Amino acid sequence: MLNDGIVRFDMKKYPVRQRWFLRPVTWLVSYPNIWLRRLKIKRSGVEGLKPPYLLLCTHHAFIDFMVTTAAIFPHRANYVVAIDGFIRREWLLRNVGGICKRKFTHDLTLIRHMKRVIDNGDILALYPEARYSQIGTTAVLPDSLGKVARFLGAPVVMLNMHGNYLSSPCWNLSKRKLQLSADFSRILTADETKSLPLNEINQRIRDAFAYDEYRWQKENMIRIKHRENARGLHKVLYQCPSCLTEYQMNSAGLRLWCEHCGKSWKLSDLGELSAENGHTEYSHLPDWYEFQRTEVRKQIESGVYEFSQEVDIDSLPNARGYINLGKGKLTHNCDGFTLESELPVAALPLYKTPATMYSCHIEYDYDARGDCIVLSTLDDTYYIYPQNIKNCVTKIALATEELFSWNQSRNRQQELPGQARFAVE
């Protein structure tokens, strides 16, 4: 507990095995939704599989949890859940097997809880992308996943879901009733988690996690007729590829356009973009997203990347709800994050170096308050709302990932000083 008198969420409390009387409730909530969407699960290598095992799941939308419930039926599981999922329902979340996590923090207590779940003979369900997919492709996965798999010493099973993102992308939550599918496969045996090199374990995990929802949509000829299917797309595609202006994109209906240069694109019912005037730079949405990543990387490598804005700050120390901390300032540059508050707050300023965050959690129009960046310590979680600039949070998330990668690259170079000198000479 910090010296501000606020009680923090009890992260050390042991995880509860999913209560028997709540298991039918999870089925009752899940099955009507997945039946409506005609879920098909393709199983591979899981014949005769029984708990305990580590279940790794892709993360696209809220319905992910319902698909997971169906995939593991009739077995129970413990789920690692972000703290905002516990707000005003801590008892329920704990008793259906929820284990609280503050995102993108190094939490050894969580590792002990995970081991306890496996030792109990249950399934540990983990969503290691730690946020909904921004553009329907795999998010950055931490190298520590391999270490976790080895420490748990249990089989590793993959649940790669399809259609969940397309039915409700994080930048436009209006529902599209699409058919869903999922690949449920064992990727590592218990013996393999103990004997294989960590790099091979991680490679198997990354291979199993690979997905591209827009490519899947086209390959399966899934036509989405939603009249507002492109609304909100400018939040994730924030930079115009024609004039390179940032934060001036906009969208509505089936159109995406740049307010600065006037260029516009239309989204087809197969999820492809075509320019309404001039050349189509990127017809495949993930390619546009990766173009933005490349642009951010250029700014980092040239030392000019900088974000500094007035923000409004909410704190989430426990499951009772948010506490507004007033105005402050968020700075993000090649040295990492700095969060300062105008009011005296015991835990602020907060500093997060690039090496401590391999990614960053962001939200679009969160709690009807606007887009926000989420930073956590082991004791608190801060929801940070930029006040004077729009559509900037996606770039901050990309920059966080690229700063981590850039920092790792520099460290590897420093570990080989002899080779570096030889190259210079």
Image (spheres, helix red, strand yellow):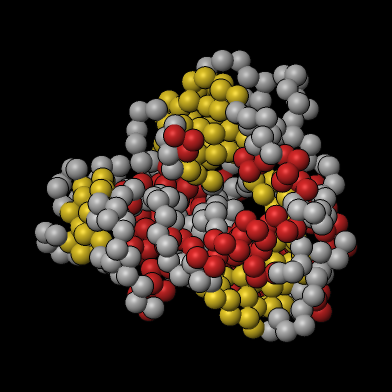
Q: Position of residue 55 (x, y in %)?
A: 70, 67
Q: Which residue is located at x 61 percent, y 60 percent?
A: 30
Q: Is residue 285 left or right of residue 186?
A: left
For residue 266, side relative to residue 309 (left or right): left
Q: x and y percent of residue 50 in the render?
A: 79, 75
Q: Quadrant location of residue 76?
A: bottom right
Can the viewer see residue 130 in this picture?
yes
Is 123 placed left or right of 159 in the picture? right
Query: Is 331 on the left-hand or right-hand side of 268?
Result: right
Examine the rendered structure and indicate whether residue 337 appears above or below residue 133. Answer: above
Quadrant in which the N terminus appears: top right
Q: Quadrant of residue 86?
A: top right
In this view, the residue farthest toward the right is 119
Percent of width and height locating residue 273: 25, 64
> Farthest top residue?
343
Q: Position of residue 405 (x, y in %)?
A: 53, 56
Q: Nearer the viewer, residue 377 or 20?
A: 20
- Residue 121 vs 357, above or below: the answer is below
The answer to whether any part of residue 418 appears in the image is no
